[in-house]
Image (tube, grey):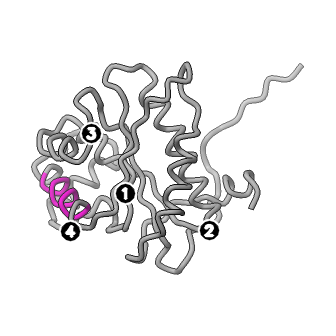
Amino acid sequence: MDAIEAILTRRSTRKMNPERPSDELIEKVVEAGRSAPSGSNSQTTHFLVITKREVLDDLERIVQEAFAAMEVTPGLYISMRNSIMAAKRGNYAYDYHAPVLIVTANKKGYGNAMADSACALENMMIAANALDLGSCWINQLHWLTDNEQVNGYMKQIGLQEDETITGGLILGYGADGGPVRTPLKRKGNPVTWIHD
């Protein structure tokens, strides 16, 4: 699969089987993230690769509790509202029970923290697709980066004191064996050309 095909066929995979990809495949995906561009070549994105089921389960519980304690208020974007409502019903697994979670973090106060991490996450998702792995961008830990329980737990497993959670992705084999590659019709993302 060439780079353009890997980009154009990448879709979010939310239903995964519990089989964990090999460390070699996970390392290839992470290396793609580490190779992403960064502002002034700062290379400050920190990758926390979580495959330990006990830690994944702990984070699922902590995140569900955090969202269940929130209230739906006017103006919340739909993803946040959906997370809160699912957590209140008690059936919320923000990571879809995937076997791998890669959390990105970056320096607090660094102006390019989100952009650098976004580039890394996109690289990892494209690499995952090229390696026949499913992936999906996960924002919930970023939304909860200031939550005392989430932040405290993340620090226990490697988040540094001077870092903030910037995003994450789940990784694994799709429930049907491979990643989701069903084409999506593009209805947004307008393009304006300014020609000579």
Q: Name the residue under label 3.
A: 159
Depth check, mark 1 against mark 3: the one in front is: 3
Q: Where is residue 121 in the image (x, y as percent from the top left)?
A: 50, 45
Q: Position of residue 3 (x, y in %)?
A: 73, 52
- Judging depth in this view, the residue of 42 and 143 nearest the camera is 42
Count neighbours of disc 4 (C-alpha within 10 A) and say few if under 14, some if 14 to 19, many if 20 or more: few
Q: Mark 1 points at which residue?
A: 101
- The amino acid marked with disc number 2 is Thr
Label 4 sits on a secondary structure element that is: loop
Label 3 sits on a secondary structure element that is: loop
Please say if the residues under marks 2 and 1 sit with CB atoms less than 8 Å apart.
Answer: no
- The amino acid marked with disc number 3 is Leu
The quarter of the image holding the N terminus is bottom right
Q: Position of residue 60 (x, y in %)?
A: 22, 60
Distance in Å between CA atoms under marks 1 and 4: 19 Å
Q: Is residue 61 magenta?
A: yes
Depth check, mark 4 against mark 3: the one in front is: 3
Q: Residue at x 38, y 76 (%)?
A: 18
The quarter of the image holding the C terminus is top right
- Judging depth in this view, the residue of 94 and 57 nearest the camera is 57
Q: Does label 2 or label 1 sit earlier along the sequence? A: 1
Label 2 sits on a secondary structure element that is: loop
Q: What kind of secondary structure does the magenta stretch mostly adopt?
A: helix
